[in-house]
Amino acid sequence: MAQVSIEVNGRPYAVGCEDGQEHHLQELGRMFDQQVRHVSADMGQLGDTRLFLMGALLLADELADARNRLAALQVEVGKLQADRSRLETRAVAALETAARRIEKLASDEAA
């Protein structure tokens, strides 16, 4: 197990992670640090626990918004896939009708 030092609001924290996940964990730590610093700038220096709670709540709010947008996009993709399927069905029917007409014209000319 790897050990990473994450700095939040100017203080280092040792965090364990799976080998190979160090860079990802450091990036997550930077995101959290930005939120905590944002809260600190807006509300002044609170205790670490309160700053961390507010930072976590802000990140949770962003995550909830992203999930809502993702759900709406998934619904839209479903509608577009259904529309595409209907259009493909209509296109196949139109091609089959055209093929029958061409075959009929060809057989009428041959007779």
Image (cartoon, rainbow, N blue to C red):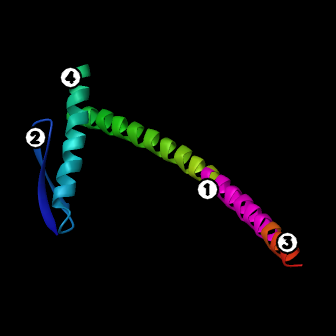
Q: Are marks 3 and 1 in contact (CB under 8 Å)?
A: no
Q: Nearer the viewer, mark 3 or mark 1?
A: 3
- Rendering quarter of residue 35: top left
Q: Nearer the viewer, mark 4 or mark 1?
A: 1
Residue shown at 58% from the left, 47% from the top: 76
**Horizontal side, residue 46 vs residue 86: left or right:** left
Q: Give the mark nearest the N terminus, 3 or 2.
A: 2
Q: Are there few (<14), some (14-19), or many (20+) residues within 10 Å of tag 1? A: few
Q: Are marks 3 and 2 in contact (CB under 8 Å)?
A: no
Residue shown at 32% from the left, 39% from the top: 56
The x and y percentages for residue 26 are 17, 52
Query: What residue would you read off at disc 4?
Result: 41
Q: Give the mark nearest the N terminus, 4 or 3.
A: 4
Quadrant for the N terminus, please: bottom left
- Rendering quarter of residue 55: top left
Dominant SS type (magenta): helix
Query: What residue would you read off at disc 1?
Result: 81
Q: Is residue 21 or residue 74 the one in the foreground? A: 74
Q: Give the mark nearest the N terminus, 4 or 2.
A: 2
Q: Is residue 9 magenta?
A: no
